[in-house]
Amino acid sequence: MSQTVQSRGKVFSFFSVLKQSIRGEQVDLTAISIKRAIVLLAIPMMLEMAMESVFALVDLYFVGHLENSSHAIQTVGLTESVLTVIYSLAIGLSMAATAVVARRIGEKNPEAASKAGMQTIVIAVAINIIISIFGLLHARDLLLIMGASTETADHGTPFVRIMMGGSLIIVLLFLINGIFRGAGNAAVAMRSLFIANLANIILCPIFIRGLGPIPAFGLTGAAIATSIGRGLGVLYQVYNLFNNKNILRIRLSYFIPDWTQIKAIIKVAAPGILQFVIASCSWIFLAQLVATTGGDVGSAGYQTSLRLMMFFLLPAWGLSNAAATLVGQNLGAGRVDRAEQSVFQTIKYTVVFLGVVSVLFLTCGHLFASFFTEDDGVKKVATRSLQILSGGFIIFGMGMVFTSAFNGAGDTWTPTKINLFTFWLFQIPFAYLLAKYFEMGPTGVFIAVPVAEVGLTIAAYILFKKGKWKKTLV
């Protein structure tokens, strides 16, 4: 009888924490149990990242059923590869925002946290004006550089122009969510992605296929729908920044450039941006290598597998982001031992989650691929890619948590150096060797990915245990 009562109590407690995490109630994350803190942060963060991945999957689903779907799928995939550079900027800035805001919140200084967050927005706007202009002028060239055929480049140029032209929306969506995560309010970040995704799901079929007075834009319609959806998500974020119902209290004066603080933020953000640019450029090279050795079918299959892979890896990344917030806030509160414990507890949850995902891809990869394309050649490549890539998911997840811990502490240089060695000095040459020299084609590229992730995780663990991150000042 007592065991039944205890079981019911645990279930009730879990749903209580679940409700609290979804509602986004303010809690001192440095004072409650580590497991409870991780769950409060991880649930909305995982849902947020899952919904971020839904953007690409929704686009992929609808364009995958258009005529000349291989061109459409390749355009969406290659554009996403180019956009990863913009995502790198967004993620680098959001990492800096999360680290600084979390540290100030841990120090019980929400005013300084609010000002730091707004200064990162100033930086983002200034940089993205340049990026948007470049993307509008060189959209077709970017597709050709990525290995797309002339026909695919002609077909996809309007799509790229809209996506690159709206890069500020992408960056703000990531950045402002990073500010809320640093403050411990991951629920607002989650809801903003929910709004953006709901709008995208509704608008995608309308703009792609047409409805009433709205013409069928085809592939271009996917870009229009995605940009509008993300824009609505940003509007929701801005509303929550200024409604004074959160721990953050925003004043217009916080948007006046403070060059001292901007320099301090850039000091953290610059290696963070470089960190993800290194990883992104590696993915871009791999995509280009697959396109040149596997043709349009190989490229479309690889891009399909990547979209599916990211759908499951992004929630794991959301889980690892919980470690970043907890490390930042606990360091700010002077609780270094608790910061380290939070990382290893997060790793346990990540291993369980990605273990399940690995089994799904190894056994049902062909079913996932079939949902997004009717082309047998594309499905075959996508299935093979998923089966090979999933072999490294568990250790990849561990590496993600260690990387997030470094970034949450403001030590963005350590994972940047790890990425430089792992991706550029090992993964790219290894992939090229397998694909070209040993004539394995796309399969060689697929094999290089999990092998490189093993090296990344081992290096991250060794450097994490050395503990230099504990002394980082932001």
Image (cartoon, grey):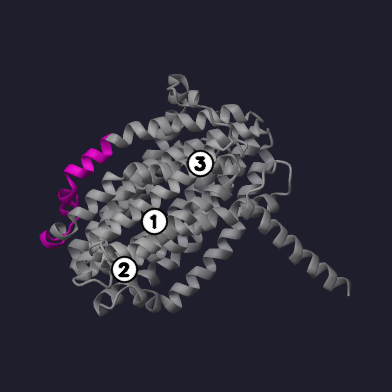
Q: Nearer the viewer, residue 299 or 68?
A: 68
1 vs 3, front mark: 3
* Marks 3 and 2 in Cβ contact (< 8 Å): no
Q: Nearer the viewer, residue 230 or 339?
A: 230
Among the two numbered marks 3 and 2 on one chain, the one whose residue lies closer to the N terminus:
2
Q: Which stretch is magenta?
A: 130-152
Please check the rendered image and state whether residue 410 is part of the magenta-colored stretch, yes or no: no
Going by the numbered disc 2, the residue's amino acid type is Phe
* Res 361 visible: yes
Among the two numbered marks 1 and 3 on one chain, the one whose residue lies closer to the N terminus:
3
Q: Which residue is mark 3?
A: 239
Residue 93 drawn at (x, y percent): 43, 38
- What secondary structure is marked by label 3? helix
Quarter of image, res 373: bottom left
Residue 334 drawn at (x, y percent): 68, 33
Q: Which residue is mark 1?
A: 452
Going by the numbered disc 1, the residue's amino acid type is Ala
- What secondary structure is marked by label 1? helix
Residue 421 to residue 58: above or below:
above
Going by the numbered disc 3, the residue's amino acid type is Tyr
Q: Residue at x 35, y 61 (%)?
A: 203
Does 218 sit left or right of 370 as displayed?
Answer: left
Marks 2 and 1, Cα distance to the nearest angstrom? 33 Å
Label ID, residue 62: 2
* Res 442 visible: no
Residue 431 drawn at (x, y percent): 28, 59
Of helix, strand and loop, which mostly describes the magenta segment?
helix
Marks 3 and 2, Cα distance to the nearest angstrom? 31 Å
